[in-house]
Amino acid sequence: MDNIGIAEKLELLSKLLDIHGADPFKAKAFAAASFTIDKLPYPLFNTPIDKWRSIRGIGASVTNALSQLQETGTIDLLEELLKNTPPGVIEMLQIKGIGPKKIHTIWKEMGIESMGELLYACQENRLLHYKGFGEKTQEAVAQSIQFILQHQGHFLFAEIEAIFPLIDNYLAQLFGKENIAVTGSFRRQLPTIEELAYVVLAEKENSKTKFETAQPPLLLEEEEGSLLYQLKNGLRLRLYFTNDLPTTLFNTSCSEDFKIAFDNIALKKGVKTAVHDAPDGILFSEKGIPFVHPAKREKGTQLFDSTSSTQTVLHENQIRGLIHCHSTWSDGSNELEEMVQECMKRNWEYMVISDHSASAFYANGLSAERVAAQHQQIDLLNKRYAPFRIFKSIESDILSDGSLDYEETVLSSFDLVIASIHSNLRMLKEKATERLIRAIENPFTTILGHPTGRLLLSRAGYPIDHEKIIDACAANKVAIEINAHPRRLDLDWTWVDHALEKGVLLSINPDAHQLEGFHDIRYGILVAQKTKLSASQNLSSFSCKEFENWLIKRK
Ligand SMILES: [Zn+2]
Ligand SMILES: [Zn+2]
């Protein structure tokens, strides 16, 4: 092992000691030794052990560690620390702007164990409650994590959508707008994207040279009809070259299951349906079957769903109220009044304010007294802005035993309660399911918030028995949220049709922590378009009156 290798091991050891909150002098000793060894003009391990202690900064414990390293290639203490540190916490060492001591706070005090969770916490303003974390640090951490996550090559749908116009323009310039069509997982509106794919009406060989610009993208893979590039931001871009755009577009934007079902339908000559204006609309028309929205090309059975559900999809303009948002009363960035005004600008008729409950101390959760004070303010605003209405709600933590925060007297002061799990996320399926069902059975629970707690691309969420949870919601007339934050999209769209079959209402909710977050409703809509969800089954599409009536009827 050369000096650089030794120095790296000692540096990591020093950082891990700080992350674990060990004696700072011990950590400093290893850091100092690492620095010295890195600068030594001769290879340390070529000199006899008894000479080591004469080197400045190398004391007894460092010598001991070094001799272990020389003999075994590692250090016991380092191995032990590595074993006891979640991999996501070690990854945080890559984040610019924070050191091991701050990572200690993030892990031990905030209870955050992965970069994705940390990014989400930044977006929820949660870092600001901790000593040493100001707005600047929070912003720097968020930016650095975004950079790192993107370079791992996986993106949220929303992240791709943000850069999509640039890429689309670039390809349109190279090939002509009418000769390109986006396909694959982006066209199917899937929550995460590993590869942005396009169909290109052009010859592959001639096209390759078009990319030989001053800053060519990296060619990763070449297959018979396609090229796979990696762009500067880490995104993989796949191009399918074809001389039959409609067919290739269709084949690359449906699942295998859907394609088989489609191929099994014989061409019916003479019974053409109207041609949809999508480039692959002609294929449906030729078979005499109704066009299926690209988002709905997952299961073969979706091909045979009734005409209305394949062609009609829920739209953003069918949202009539903002359900699930946070204000400055807990961890949101905006005052209630600003939020009301923003809702009215969007022609929404009501807002369900659901700040965090008391046990969410990290999010400045509301004590019973502050709930009462907030209700006073809501009453005033409701007078001022009528007929716009603010519904009094709370995002009540589901405690470990499945009970809700607050005494019944407080719970009964809300118009509705959104119940969510935010703490003790590490649970086995059985425990998590029981915990949720107890909360669902609580007569005060109205909506189940983000059912699995997952954060896309960063935290799997606790495992739950979806069927049991959906049955419990059906039995207790509890609606299930489709949390529309692009990193959540929880309930997952694959369970929505099942919930609808059981008669459960869904609710597309942005879980907004600032005005800009209202926009996230879009991502809930896009995944809902993959399902049969219609406005009549989505709570946030209810008019104010319908929503009010529904609440009364439930009680
Ligand atoms: Zn929540
Ligand atoms: Zn929330």
Image: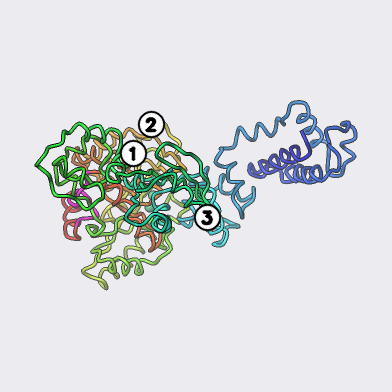
Q: Which residue is mark 3?
A: 213
Most extreme residue toward the bottom is: 384
Tell me which segment is drawn in magenta: 532-542
Q: Which residue is mark 1?
A: 436
Q: Amino acid at mark 2?
A: Lys
Q: Give the label, 2 or 3, closer to the camera.
A: 3
Beta carbon at label 1 within 8 Å of ligand 1? no
Could you say whether the residue bearing mark 3 is in a helix, strand or loop?
Answer: loop
Are the two marked residues, 1 and 3, in contact with CB atoms closer than 8 angstroms? no
Could you say whether the residue bearing mark 2 is in a helix, strand or loop?
Answer: helix
Q: Residue at x 52, y 55 (%)?
A: 213
Near-viewer residue (415 or 412): 415
Near-viewer residue (198 or 98): 198
Q: Which mark is residue 142?
A: none
Q: Which residue is mark 2?
A: 429
Q: Residue at x 63, y 44 (%)?
A: 19
Q: Gap between marks 2 and 1, in whole Å?
A: 11 Å
Numbered disc total: 3
Q: Can residue 367 be seen in the rendering of this structure?
A: no
Q: Residues within 10 Å of mark 2 (few under 14, many from 20)?
A: some
* 492 part of magenta stretch: no
* 536 part of magenta stretch: yes
Near-viewer residue (432 or 228): 228
Residue 107 picture location, percent across and down:
56, 45
- Looking at marks 1 and 3 on the same chain, the residue that comes earlier in the sequence is marked by 3
